[in-house]
Image (spheres, helix red, strand yellow):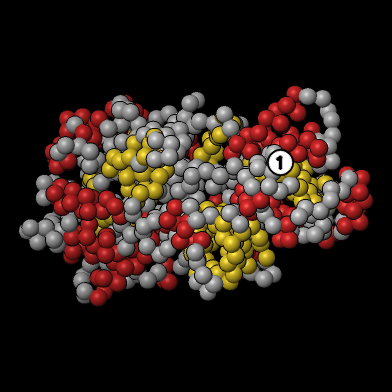
Amino acid sequence: MIIEDGRVVASTQIGELGALLSIYAPDVASRASAGQFVHVRPGTGWDPLLRRPYSFCRIDRRGGEVELIVKPLGPGGEWIATRHVGETLDLLGPLGTAFVVRRDTKNLLLVAGGTGIAPMRVIAEQEAARRSVTLVMGGRSVAYLWPSDRLPASVEYVATTDDGSFGIKGRVTDVMPDLLGWADQLLACGPWPMLAAIGRMRDDAARGPVVPGRQALIDAQIAVEQHMGCAMGVCRACVIVTANGNARVCREGPVFALGDVAFEAGEPATVGLT
Amino acid sequence: MPSARVSPEERLEHAAEGEEERDAVELASLDGATIIEAATGEPEEAVATPSIAIDAERLADAQIVTTKEETWPERGVDLEVDAARGLRLKNPVLTASGTFGQGIEYAELIDVSRLGAIVNKGTTRNPRPGNPQYRIAETPAGILNSIGLENPGAAEVARVYGPKWAKLRVPVIVNVAGYSVDDYVFVVEALAQTPGVVAFELNISCPNVEGGLLFGQDPALAAEVTRAVRETTDLPVIVKLTPSATDVVAVARAVEEAGADGLTAINTVLGMRIDTAKRRPILGTGSGGLSGPAIRPIAVHITYQVAQAVSIPIIGAGGVTSADDALEFLMAGASAVQVGTATFADPEVPLRVIEGLAAYVREQKLSSIRDVIGAALPNGGRMVPRG
């Protein structure tokens, strides 16, 4: 990873998801992979102090650009989200692990919730010409969905909303059973309750008979979020519990095998009770 | 508007048409695949059932940043200090425990061999899983943390990181934490022979774990643990003071009397933030340790007080972000400083502090950085025994 001053080249509001910042940062872009993230400094001073982690939402290596979705959460997120075209952003990255799409995957199922769309969009763009890709995205309402015109045309887009304002009324896990039989591989990113619900589907599938889609659930990869400090693996603020013990989301993650992550009541399992 | 759903059969046909030779090549060139390869030594296609566990330490080995000494801006300036009795360092800038891991992580970004020394993550007798989430919260110009001394235990630290420290070409100070005098002695014995280790820093003040506060708040207990460690090793022993003590100066005097070779002033300050929506503290343990620029005036003041009460060197710590901040500590009587929280925001701060101190020595036409140690004290200077 490196530290690079990126230059904002475009800024667009994507409904309630946040500001979509296009940033010219060729050194970061050339190293970045879907699922990895950059740690962005919210200013040049010491208040707010901590960098904010954002998963790549687009990686254009040839053009030297990356895109990030920035929710204006707190003073740091707000500062980053309101950068204008031409201003610079101090980027540390790319950091963490990436999603791995298997070479033999023909049918790729992507599941996203909220800003969890970011890495799923990167994969959709990278894989659309190579294999069959279906993206399931869930949100509170239509304002929280990713616009379909910002996806490759060949990607099948299935939307769910809690209030039924667009697509299918319900959650992503309501439509997943219909799609899993088709899928060779499943990748997901979103809030913890969503990932935990997919984790329960995996547990059920692992106990159940061999049916189409079972292996995709069992082998699923997820990218998770956690309150983060350094993002360099030193402070251990972002650890979660996995089958391999404590794991740093910034280092061993953010992409994990779904089956390795321990959940507890729809949230990451509590650390420290071993 | 989502397009009409396509049946799985149609999709398979579509996929067969779209499959191209170059795809596999491009995929293999992705960094993600490269990282997996670097970590597992296996080609990407061998990851049939993806196991995403990455051996970060092994990965770090391959990517340590090194620069030529001839290119260091601080070259040729006398920045040498005795950070503790018997601990002469090439410059007075260290990294603070808990903010620099085991030294290898930031070595991927900066040349850590330029640092005076690094202080590793608090090490305990047994492995510790650490505290429940959340472990970190932001505060005005600072952070609160409650990590809970998560570490793999002294034996594992020696086994895994010893060989890496030997390669880093920077002195390592082991930060020792414990819950009994025996715990401290055990950790020091386990790491005293480890290559690269030049001194021990006793964390008698970690406010996050029940019981950890006691040693640093009581001059007699602090002296007891210092004496026990003093008798265990010939390496310099530094005691990290807690601002939570009622009389920090009394603790400083007591540990000097018990044989401490140096002091670090200060550890984090106890604090709390409340999540007003959830009506409960943000941190999983309720309270945590405050660090960052927010505590700098507290740390400078304690340094100033302690410097007038003891004759062993002091390492100032608390919110250092620049050479000017470091100079405040040096002029208050510290012989060196630790950079901690600022590194999270800007990993280059420790090196920039070194460069800034070198520039200051040049501009002020000093013979060495030592000339400013204690310059702000009532007597206008501080004489600490050298060597």
Q: Is residue B260 visible?
A: yes
Residue A28 horizontal/vertical position (percent): 59, 63
Q: Residue furthest left?
A: B379
The answer to whether A94 appears left or right of B308 in the picture is right
The answer to whether B9 appears left or right of B277 in the picture is right
Label tally: 1
Residue B246 horizontal/vertical position (percent): 16, 37
Q: Amino acid at mark 1?
A: Lys
Reply above or below: B71 against B42: below
Q: Is residue B59 visible?
A: no
Residue B170 horizontal/vertical position (percent): 40, 54
In the image, A131 versus A248, the foreground residue is A131
The answer to whether A189 appears left or right of A73 in the picture is right
Residue A31 horizontal/vertical position (percent): 63, 61
Reply above or below: A205 against B289: above
Residue under circle 1?
A: A169
Which corner quadrant of the image does residue B332 belong to?
A: bottom left
Pick the quarter of the image with the N terminus of chain B.
Answer: bottom right
Residue at disc 1, secondary structure:
strand
